[in-house]
Amino acid sequence: MPGEAPVPGEAPATLPWHSKILFGIGAIGEHVYTGMFNAFIVIFYNQALGLPNTLIGTAVLVALVGDAISDPAVGILSDRLRSPWGRRHPFLLAAPIPLALSLWCIFNPPAMLLAEGVDGGLAQVWPLFAWLLLWTTLSRLFVTLYVIPHLALGGELVRSQHERSQLFSMNTIFGYATGTLFSFIAWSYFLNGETPGPDGVPVANHLQAASYAPLSLFAAVLILVAISTCALGTLARGRALSQPPQAQVTMSLPLFFRKILGTLANRNYLFLLIGFFFFMISVGVSETLNVFVYTYFWELGASEIRWLGLAGFPGILLGAALAPPLMRRFDRRPVLLVAIAGMVLFAQLVVNARLLGLLPANGADILLPLLMANAFGLALTVGVAGVTILSMIGDVIDENELATGLREEGLFYSARAFFAKLSSSAGHFLAGVMLDWYVRLPQEAVPGQLAEDVVFRLGLAAGPIMALSATIALFFYARYRLSHARHAEIMTELRARAARSRPEAPSDALSAG
C-alpha cells in the first residue's frame, strides 16, 4: 500500500535516563490495574458478593471477544496514525480517565444488584454478572488503548539492543515493583483486620465488599496519575519519532486479518507467541488461586499476606537490573529459558512441599519466612523474564522491518498483548471452574474450618496442575533463534538500506548498538 511505511532513522542510539524513567512510570498504571483486577476480582465477587466462580471466569473469558478486535486494531491504527503528537500519544492521552473509571465501577456495583433472595443467596445473579461483564469488557478495552501504544513506543524510542534492554528493564522495575508495593498497601491499610458480619461474627475485611470501595478508588487515582505522567513526559520524544508520510487510519476486514496473520510468518515471533500463550495460562490460574491459597491453604491473615508481596519487591528490582547484563553476556534465549524454568519451580515449590508433608504446620513461626523467601525467588525470575521477553519482541520488529520495510511496533506488541489476554483469561476461567467443580470451595468458607480433602485439592490445583502449561511453554521458547550476532547483522543491513535511500545525508542512517 503506497505511503504505508514510516520513514526510518529518527530513533537515537542512546536514550537519557530521565526519558527511560518517564517511560517506565507508565507501567505503574498497567500493573496497578492488573494487580487490582487479577488478585481480587474472584474473591470479591465470589466470597464477598456471592457470584459463582464459574460465572466470574466466564465474564473474564467473554470479555476477550472485544480484545480479539481491539488489541490488533489499536496496534495497527497506532502504526498508521499521523498526528501533531506522533503515532502513539493520542492513544496514551485518551486512555487514563476511562480506564480509572471502569476499574472503580467493577468494584462498586449498584446496591440494588446485591439484594439477597429468600434462601439467603444472591437474588440478582444475572444482573450482577452482566455488570461485571460490561465493565470488565470496557476496562480491558481501555487497557488496550494504553498498553499497546506504550509498548510500541518503547520498541521505537531507541534502536540499540542493549539500550532497548535497559529501557524495558526500567519498565519492568516500575511495573512489577509497583505491583508488589500496591499489594502490600492493599493488605496493610485497606483489607487488614476484621469487622463484624451481618450476624455479628467477625469476618476478615478482605472477605467483605465494603473494604474494596476505598481500595478501588486508590487504585484508580494511581492509574490516572501514572499514565498521564508517562504520556505527558514522553510527548516531546514521541513527536520526534517516525510517522507515516500521510495518515492511514482507515481499516478493512481483509487488511485486519492480513496484518495479524502476517506477524505469524516470522518464525521467531511465532514461537514467542505460542510459548507466551501456554505460559500465561498458568499465570491466569495462579493469579486467580493465589488469594484463596493464602487464605485457606496457608491460613494467613491480611497482616501476613502483605509481607509476601513486599518480599517480591527486591526480587523484581534485582531481576530487572540483572536482565540487561545477563542478555549481553549469554544472549536472550538462554537467559529466558533459565528464568522461565525458575518461575515454574518457585510458583509451585512451597505448595508441593506442603502436599508432600515437607513444610511445618500452619501457624509455625518459620512458615512465613519460608514463604517470603520463595516469593523473593519467584519475583527475581519474573523480573528477568519480563525484561527479556519485551526485548526479544523489539528485536523481532527489527527483523520484520528488514523483511518488509515497515516499522510495526504497535502490531507486534498488540499480538503479544492479545495472546497474553487470551491465555490469561482462559486461565482465570479454568481456575474458576476448578474452584467450583474440582476443589468444591464452599460459599462463605471459614479459614481453618475446611475439610482436609478440599484443602488438598486446592493445593493440587495451585501447584502441579497450575504449572503444567508453563512447562509446555519452555519447549516453544527454546525454538527462538534470533541471536545477538544475527541482530547485529540485521542492524547493519538496515543502516545500509537507510544510507542508500538518503544518499544526501548518509550520517542520518539508523543508529545501532
Image (cartoon, rainbow, N blue to C red):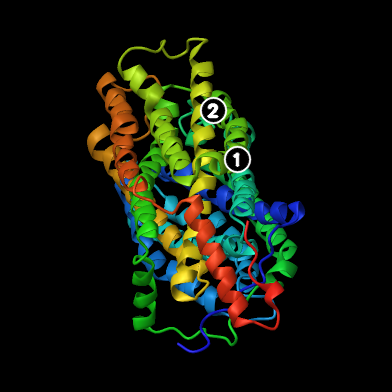
Indicate left or right for 312 with 62 as reference. Answer: right
Which quadrant holds residue 48? top left
Front in this rendered view, residue 392 or 448: 392
- Classify mark 1: helix, strand or loop: helix
Q: Mark 1 or 2, which is nearer the eye?
A: 1
Residue 178 pos. (x, y %): 62, 42
Please tell me whether residue 70 is drawn above or below residue 226 in the rendered image.
below
Residue 24 pos. (x, y %): 65, 52
The residue sitting at 55% across, 51% down in the picture is 33
Front in this rendered view, residue 211 or 384: 384
Per the model, the C-alpha gap separating discs 1 and 2 is 20 Å
Which quadrant holds residue 68? bottom left
Please tell me whether residue 254 is drawn above or below residue 320 in the rendered image.
below
- Classify mark 2: helix, strand or loop: helix
Could you tell which of marks 1 and 2 lies nearer the N-terminus? 1
Please tell me whether residue 223 is drawn above or below residue 377 in the rendered image.
below
Q: What is the quadrant of the N terminus in the image?
A: bottom left
Q: Which mark is residue 376?
A: 2
Label 2 environment density (alpha carbons within 10 Å; few <14, some 14–19, many ≥20): many
Q: What is the quadrant of the C terminus in the image?
A: bottom right
Please tell me whether residue 64 is drawn above or below residue 192 in the rendered image.
below
Residue 85 pos. (x, y %): 69, 76
- Mark 1 lies on residue: 325
* Amino acid type for the residue under numbered disc 2: Phe
Indicate left or right for 209 with 466 as reference. Answer: right
Q: Is residue 43 visible?
A: no
Indicate left or right for 223 with 74 as reference. Answer: right
The residue sitting at 59% across, 69% down in the picture is 495
* Amino acid type for the residue under numbered disc 1: Pro
Front in this rendered view, residue 114 or 430: 430
